Image (cartoon, rainbow, N blue to C red):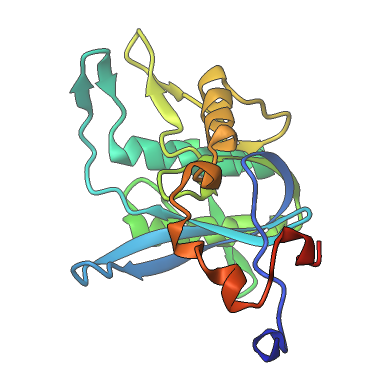
Amino acid sequence: MTATAGLKEGGKFLSAGIHTAKFNSLSLGNLTSQKDGSEYNTMTISLDVDGYGEYTQNFFEPKSGERTQSQFGPNPSQAEQFMVSLRQIFDALDPAIGEKFDKDEVTVNVGGKEKHISVKDLDFTQLVKLAAIVTAPYAGTEVEIKLVPQQNGFNAFPGFPAKINRAGALGIATRFIGHGLSLSQSEQKKIAAAQNSRPTNMAASDTSALNGVADALGIDDNSDLPF
């Protein structure tokens, strides 16, 4: 029992589904691959989730602006997936943010004066830094977020929020942040499948390794067990 001295509560688990949260910030980040040491630029969103605490998720810098083709038609490019993600964040905080980007009317305060920033030719780093500045005043804004099971066993935002409609226009496949969110049928099935997964059935497992334990403990039969 000395090994149990000083035990601490384990980490909290953030369940799949829709959660109420407060927006904290956007920031520029960088991740290094443990596999090959490659470095990746990211946009990191930080939120304070009710009943959980701080939650962060990274959006990787898109490497391609080209759409791919599947048997069901064209798929959005990496750049389009990222831009739809960013637009959802803007819309959740204040739709006016995205409208200013659309009209190239974004301004920032520099030395007490408003300076226009043209968004047309910004690279990823510049765009994320600008997004961090324009969303900073909205820290504490209440939003809803959607988390779905991932292959790594954790829950996170849906990975592909954009879609191409039949007319070839860019659209939203699923909204992961906003207000009045709902789960699609496929998302509900994915969550149900993860919840219904069961650990190994120990009753059907080989218990031969336990043979002789009772004798070693001096227990004559099951009636001596303290439960």
Q: Residue at x 62, y 55 (%)?
A: 135
Which residue in the rendered view is the most extreme toward the top? 166
141 vs 40, left or right, is right
Picture quadrant of residue 122: bottom left
223 vs 101, left or right, is right
Return the residue nearer the eye: 71 or 226. Answer: 226
Q: Quadrant of the N terminus?
A: bottom right
Image location (x, y in percent) of residue 227: 81, 61
Q: Residue at x 69, y 68 (%)?
A: 220
Image location (x, y in percent) of residue 190: 51, 29
Residue 60's place in the image compared with 147, above or below, is below
Can the viewer see residue 104 in this picture?
no
Residue 40's place in the image compared with 120, above or below, is below
Picture quadrant of residue 137: bottom right
Which residue in the rendered view is the most extreme toward the right? 227
Image location (x, y in percent) of residue 108: 57, 61
Image location (x, y in percent) of residue 117: 46, 55
